Image: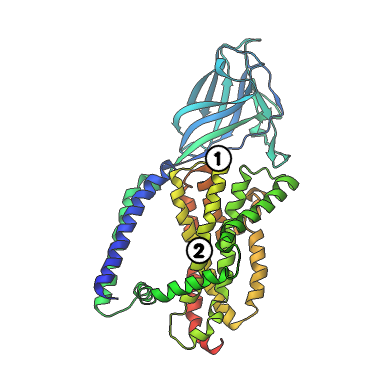
Amino acid sequence: MNQKTLMKVCSVALVVYVLLAVAFYFICGDQLKFRDNTTDMLSANGVIGEITSDVVLSQKIDLSGDRLIGLTLYGATYERQNTGILRVELYSDDKLIALSDVDVSGLADNALFYVPFNMEDISGVKTAELRISAPEGVSGNAVTLYVGNTYQAAHNQIDAGLGVDDLLLINGVASDIALCMSINTRDILSLGTYYWQIAFGFALILAVYFAWILRRYKQGKGSMFLNVIDAFYRYKYLIKQLVARDFKAKYKRSVLGILWSFLNPLLTMTVQYIVFSTLFKSDIPNFALYLLSGIVCFNFFNEATTMALSSIVGNASLITKVYVPKYIYPLTRVVSSTVNLLLALIPLFVVMILTGSPFTFSLLLVPLCVICLFAVALGIGLFLSSAMVFFRDTQFLWGVVSMLWMYATPIFYPESIIPEKFMTLYKCNPLYHIIRFLRIVLMDGLSPEPKAYLLMIIISFVPLIIGSVVFKKTQDRFVLNI
């Protein structure tokens, strides 16, 4: 590779970064600027009776966030159209911080209704007192609110564990219940506020790094970036041939051939969908898309790592006769599996259409999930291919580990069933973050919160770094053991 080609590569990489930074800002939209939070609502166990002018409801609530958007309450009208207003106030240290009047004539019976606030600043408020009254309410012309003391969990009700400070007060008298309501708050994200400054800073760092790379090239010195670019440039024909060979070998003598890339995830989804939606009564919304997204991701991971595992041992005749950077062998196996992954995304989009899922610009974030999946699979593949050379039982151990990994990944069950004390360990699974990210994009049509990006990228590239280090330290001894 000459200097002109290297300059071209660096220039293209810088331009691509700028385009991606601009596209990312507009694709993420409001999710980059703020994050909305909604608390869980209690299950309704009864009503408090008519809220007349002589009734004042009060309850302490916890607030977290920078802005208060509103409350969602569950009320009833006694199957009539009432008149007047329902006054909803929030106090902090006896100081009024939010006020909203709701016209009760527009409320539906036995329904949720929203109480908006004017984006009140609550950044310094942790708890507040909610007061609800009806200045014009009289018997026969008043509404009521639902109350409860349990939460819905799957098909069961669990005790909310209400403390003394959580209970509803009716005219100052404590009850043993609380209002059925959810609190809507908003966090203002620093990343959205300073996005362009951060993006420019990274562009500057990237430009300085490329300048340093070019200087080292002129001085005849190497670097990891130069070595990788040079290897891809020099062995690009071999890489194409190895990828094509692995892809063709998978479907050799198969009647349906490449169609199995479409059928395999669909058939797996169909079987598991029948089992978990009928026998085990899964209540996950849009379970078909939820299930298929997990299956597609894990199938790729399992196939790529299994193929990479035997990449060094399986190419022993080439390695002992011809010099080629050894990491190319596991790399081409993972690339070959990536082709299958891209094909498997087609039935995933078909299921989106059939289930009426939203098609938004957030779908442009799917390639980021593919890149992170690729990084995880390559990192694990490099580690396994190295271990396989010295310990041939690796292939059998990996069969057991991959099965455990599947059950440790939320493919067909919700993460809510995992006990809180195990969640920290559970979230160390890179596939958890990738699949969660993908489901938000596909099922909600939204960009995940910035924290989700950071966690997914970091935990995806950690295995790649570890696998690369292990592979590099052991590759010189491969020829003595294969």
Q: Is residue 158 left or right of residue 332?
A: right
Please tell me whether residue 121 is drawn above or below residue 229 in the rendered image.
above
How far across and down, in percent of the image, does residue 108 sit? 60, 20
Residue located at (65% from left, 27% from top):
168
Mark 1 residue type: Gly
Looking at the rendered image, the quarter that the N terminus falls into is: bottom left
Q: To which quarter of the image does residue 400 belong?
A: bottom right
Residue 298 seen in this snapshot: yes
In front of the other: 309 or 25: 309
Mark 2 residue type: Thr
In front of the other: 174 or 210: 210
Residue located at (68% from left, 36% from top):
162
How far across and down, in percent of the image, does residue 70 sit? 51, 30
How far across and down, in percent of the image, does residue 270 sit? 66, 51
In front of the other: 472 or 347: 347
Q: To which quarter of the image does residue 203 belong?
A: bottom left
Residue 434 seen in this snapshot: no
Please tell me whether residue 372 is drawn above or below residue 110 in the rendered image.
below
User: What residue does disc 2 label?
Assistant: 338
Q: How is the image coloured?
A: rainbow
Please tell me whether residue 251 is drawn above or below residue 152 in the rendered image.
below
How far across and down, in percent of the image, does residue 378 sit? 50, 68
Q: To which quarter of the image does residue 432 belong?
A: bottom right
Q: Are marks 1 and 2 in contact (CB under 8 Å)?
A: no
